[in-house]
Amino acid sequence: MIESQRHSYHLVDPSPWPISGSLGALATTVGGVMYMHSFQGGATLLSLGLIFILYTMFVWWRDVLRESTLEGHHTKAVQLGPRYGSILFIVSEVMFLFAFFWASSHSSLAPTVEIGGIWPPKGIGVLDPWEIPFLNTPILPSSGAAVTWAHHAILAGKEKRAVYALVATVSLALVSTGFQGMEYYQAPSTISDSIYGSTFFLATGFHGFHVIIGTLFLIICGIRQYLGHLTKEHHVGFEAAAWYWHFVDVVRLFPFVSIYWWGGI
Amino acid sequence: MASSIARSGFRLGAAACSRRGTTSGRRGFASSAHHDDAYEAAKWEKITYLGIVTCTVLSIYNLSKGHHHSPDPPPYPYLRIRTKEFPWGPDGLFEIKHHSEDHH
């Protein structure tokens, strides 16, 4: 079939995954609302929905990897699609996190009388920014350096070194998540402690969630590099993971400066 | 069979690229200069090691210092806002520790 193709575009086959992903998303939202309102069966529907979404993600990306790596459908023209898609996705993520920093700045720059007119609010215990928060800040940029190492190793055709570099990247990412968990466990306040807790845990929690997503993305890239999927001419998936990872490690500097440091002393 | 499909796919892709880029506007891929990438890879490997050493020293310093516990604040109305029970029980996700630990 492909022999008769006279253009460089990939005309995809019909796929069941968009509708299965949509059904999974529907079950997740309905189940999530039911769970949060303590309806019977809410937890079951939520779990089923999440399993459905995870399954869809797995098989859909499996199909994309088959089409690109094994069937060679991802020509230079086709590669532009996922590149633009990844960049637009990251731009939307920047706006998403910007909203939480806006909320935090809005609440802290002019604290209301209800919280004592001061920031942090009266009675709120805050973390010392120079303890775990400061320790966690250089770990992500170091991980970013390791992913740059991996990128140049791939471009230089050093396949084994690239795997080592990705192992270093992922290890630093896991250490960072570990410290974040430790910090949350030791935190003197919770998300239900005034607007301080709400904005603090929403912003830092969503950043931490993005670290976890980026880590999973990099783990997949590491496995694909180990399997020899990534070549120096063709590694769009890795590039998207690296862009995403740099977004995550640069964004970490904003909560450190504005929320932990300025907002905590 | 898959490999023959892959080969023809790559050939078509390569043909499409060479058709598009003749003399001007051809994209210079970073992979065209191998030595630079090997140099850059070695440089970033060193930067990574430097980062790991810095983070390790910071971690040891921080963790050996320990952390202080703050006393419980007075029950201001804006603290511990509970309007209904969580689906998993009465406590927030990160405050179960308050039942077992005594405060300093």
Image (cartoon, coloured by chain):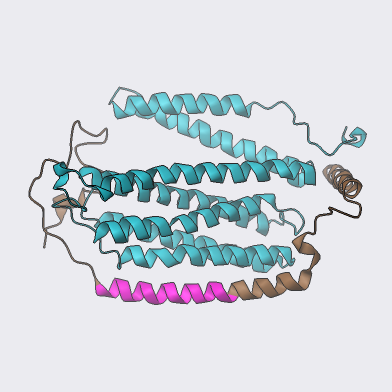
Q: In the rendered structure, does residue B63 fall within the stretch colored magenta?
A: yes
Chain B takes which shade in the image? brown
Q: Is residue A203 above or below residue B83?
A: below
Residue at image point 28% right, 43% down? A198
Label count reads: 0
The secondary structure that dominates the magenta segment is helix
Q: Where are the magenta residues, as a range?
A: B46-65
Q: Residue at x 66, y 59 (%)?
A: A226
Q: Quadrant of the C terminus of chain A?
A: bottom left
Q: Nearer the viewer, residue B98 or A189?
A: A189
Q: Which chain is cyan?
A: A
The spot of residue A225 in percent (x, y) is 67, 57
Does A223 sit left or right of A6 as displayed?
left
Kindly identify the residue that appears in the image at 20 percent across and 55 percent down.
A188
Q: Is residue B65 above or below residue A125?
A: below
Q: Is residue A208 left or right of residue A58?
A: left
Residue at image x 41%, y 51%? A208
